[in-house]
Image (spheres, grey):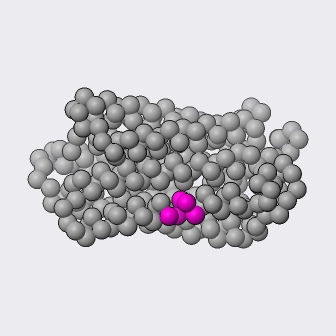
Amino acid sequence: ITPTGLAADIYGVTLAFSILSTIVLGLRVTARIQSMKFAIEDALMCVGWLINMVHNAVIIYGAHTGLGTPDSGIPGGPTGVTIFLWQCFFLSGYVFIKCSICITLLRIAVNKRHRLILWILIGVSVVSTVFVQLYVLLQCRPIAASWGEVPGTCVTSMITVAITFIISGFNLITDVTTAVLPFIIIKDIQMGKEKKRAVIVVLSLGVLASVATIVRLPYATAYFATSDYMVGMGDIIMWTVVECDTALIAGSLPMVRTL
């Protein structure tokens, strides 16, 4: 299928963010290796980027196979393979990105309360991700019923929507905290005013990840759709691309210019 309308938007946004995040990560890795400071947070970000690229590749493939396209434009009707794979890779990549950001902040945080908050964020992110992954794999029996390949028994859409809102709530809390906490931490660090302003501008990009989480929440009702299901899910999925890649970019740019 040639992507048009929303499908074309999904394709364009995903491709653009994939290229941009890859460039930024490449600059980060180069800077860290040259300064001989490549550490665990850099490795975690690289793992997060790798899974995120698989996530984005699935979405680009989906844009060519019905994602974001009305039922009438999909030969043979919609298939849920793209949705299932997206569910598998979305949070599994994002958790590495979040943990990388938190560990980076742990290296400069001296206040015990700030450090405790960061460790709690890591714990919440890991636990919620494991929970979602188990739910995705166990929501239908047999598992192929998840994308409609064979008949089976699945949980109701109401449960999926409820979990979506709960996990999105956790994501919003962790996104906002990781976006705001750096400003509080940096305020107490001895750093030139010009450099501090530059770092704050870069870190403020993290707020956009929180905005993306908020924007996609109303689209969760797409799980109830009985027609044009791939259109509603397309809106949700496009905003997860913005959320993940913006966090990756915001978490990597400060490393290009070492704190």
Residue depicted at 86% across the width and 51% down the height: 150
**Going 41% across and 43% down the picture, which residue do you hit?**
45
**Residue 38 in which image quadrant:** top left
Residue at 85% in and 59% down: 152
Q: Does 128 appear in magenta?
A: yes
The quadrant where residue 53 appears: top right
The percent position of residue 115, horizontal first and vertical second, equals 27, 64
Let me know if residue 109 is in the magenta part: no
For the magenta stretch, what is the residue range?
127-131
Q: Name the residue nearer the viewer: 96 or 80.
A: 96
Relative to 259, 102 lies left or right: right
Is residue 153 placed above or below 88 in the rendered structure? below
Q: Residue at x 36, y 59 (%)?
A: 178
| Main secondary structure of the magenta stretch | helix
Q: Position of residue 66 (x, y in %)?
A: 76, 41
Q: Position of residue 148 (x, y in %)?
A: 82, 52
Tell whether 18 sits left or right of 3. Answer: left
Q: How many marks?
A: 0
68 displayed left or right of 104: right
Rendered-image quadrant of the C terminus: top left
Considering the image in quadrants, where does the N terminus appear? top right
